[in-house]
């Protein structure tokens, strides 16, 4: 009985450790996505300006 209790505690600790690691990974991934979004937005704006310049000629 006590052995089962210890295994449950180990599982709980392992679960929360993995949960915390997953949360940290998702935070880092979210920052990376935001950085790429800003880069792409800047590139698209520059492209739009070039297209507008070309159509004005």
Image: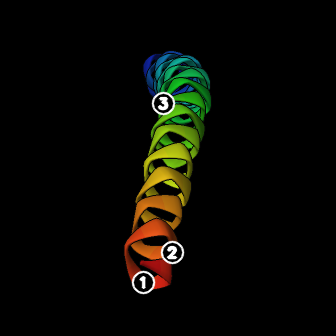
Q: Residue furthest bottom?
A: 55
**Mark sitting on residue 55:** 1
Depth check, mark 2 against mark 3: the one in front is 2
Residue 53 drawn at (x, y percent): 48, 67
Q: How many marks?
A: 3
Q: Residue at x 62, y 30 (%)?
A: 27
**Where does residue 54 sit, x and y in percent of width and height?**
37, 73
| Alpha carbon separation for disc pair 2 and 1 | 5 Å
Distance between mark 3 and mark 1 Cα atoms: 35 Å
Name the residue at 58% across, 41% down: 38
Q: Which mark is residue 6?
A: none
28 relative to 45, above or below:
above
Circle 3 Cα neighbour tier, 10 Å, few/some/many (<14 / 14–19 / ≥20): few
Above-or-below relation of 28 to 35: above
> Are the two marked residues, 2 and 1, in contact with CB atoms closer than 8 angstroms?
yes
Q: State which tag comes first along the sequence, 3 or 1.
A: 3
Q: Nearer the viewer, residue 23 or 30?
A: 30
Residue topped by disc 3? 32
Q: Secondary structure at mark 1?
A: helix
Q: Crowding at label 1, few (<14), some or many (≥20) Cα neighbours within 10 Å?
A: few
| Near-viewer residue (22 or 8) | 22
Residue at horizontal 43 percent and vertical 48 percent from the top: 43
Q: Which mark is residue 52?
A: 2
Q: Classify mark 2: residues with Cα within 10 Å, few (<14), some (14-19) or many (20+).
A: few
Q: Separation of disc 2 and disc 3 at Cα? A: 30 Å
Which tag is nearer the camera, tag 3 or tag 1? 1
């Amino acid at each position: 009985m006590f052995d089962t209790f210890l295994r449950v505690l180990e599982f709980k600790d392992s679960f929360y450790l993995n949960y915390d690691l997953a949360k940290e990974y998702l935070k880092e991934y979210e920052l990376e996505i935001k950085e790429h979004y800003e880069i792409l937005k800047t590139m698209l704006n520059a492209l739009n300006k070039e297209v507008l310049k070309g159509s004005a000629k």
